[in-house]
Image (cartoon, helix red, strand yellow):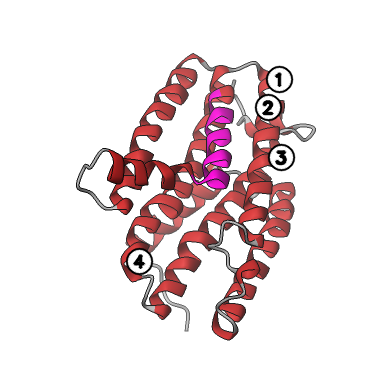
Amino acid sequence: MTRELTEPDRVDSSRMSRLIDFLELRRPDLRVLALLFIAADLFLMVAYLYFRLDSPESWPWDIRNEHGLGERYQSLKQFWCLLVLGLIWVRRRSFVVFAWAVVMAYYLVDDSRRIHERMSVYLVDQLDLGISTSVGEFVWYAAVGAVLTVLVALGHRWADEATRRLSLKIGGYFLALIVCGVVLDFVHDPFVEIVPIDIALTFLEDGGEQVILSLLTAFLICQILPGAVSRSVPAGGA
């Protein structure tokens, strides 16, 4: 028996459809690329779960470990994003694209060098602010995020309409990355000793960040494919 959709169901479905259209997730080329990247993400997540339950010390498969395969794959995707943003900037000569390249460069360096963790220790130990390292990381992210947001906002203001649309879409992906990489990381800390909750939150935090970064990587690569600009501009648009 088919359930009739209620008004809230229709609203939620409409919002999801608009979000999918906004992020261009109906594009066949983007879907193929995204599925390839996400297949690797899922493999790493399943491998993490298997080795976490069977051999917790198997660090190469630990998607939380900065020297593990998951982190290296993430760094590779970040590098690809940075490279593609550089190519888009060369084509469009738009400051907002350059600003997003700066954001991606910081994201790559921060992830690989653990800058947020080092600065958190500095805030806690050297400045004696009386806060935990988790709060210190949050403070550091907020400070850096404010500076980078101003940079992107200035570029967005000066950009043409088509580049503004591109910038908003990139911003949507980064907002999702912040939820997984920063907010869920803050929520995760108190539960690392409770194995079932730790595993679940690791999937949401680290696994979620991997999947979203895969979508962003596929999205950006599709922007440099032939006909990408015409596909991203709606009929009658700039």
Q: Say what secondary structure mark 3 lies in.
A: helix
- Using a 10 Å C-alpha cutoff, classify the residue at mark 3 as few (fewer than 14 neighbours), some (14 to 19) or many (20 or more): many
Cα separation between marks 1 and 2: 6 Å
Left or right of residue 8: residue 69: right
Q: Say what secondary structure mark 1 lies in.
A: helix
Q: Earlier in the sequence, mark 2 or mark 4?
A: 4
Image location (x, y in percent) of residue 155: 49, 19
Report if the CB atoms under discs 2 and 3 are less than 8 Å apart. no
Report if the CB atoms under discs 1 and 2 are less than 8 Å apart. yes
Cα separation between marks 1 and 4: 48 Å
Numbered circle sitting on residue 86: 2
Of the residues shown, which amino acid type is indicated by label 1?
Val
Disc 4 designates what residue? 6
**Where are the magenta residues, as a range?**
99-114
Disc 3 designates what residue? 221
Cα separation between marks 2 and 3: 11 Å
Indicate which label's residue lies in the foreground, 1 or 4. Answer: 1
Q: Residue at x 36, y 30 (%)?
A: 146
Quadrant of residue 62 within the rendered picture: bottom right
Left or right of residue 198: residue 64: right
Image location (x, y in percent) of residue 51: 61, 79
Quadrant of residue 166 within the rendered picture: top right
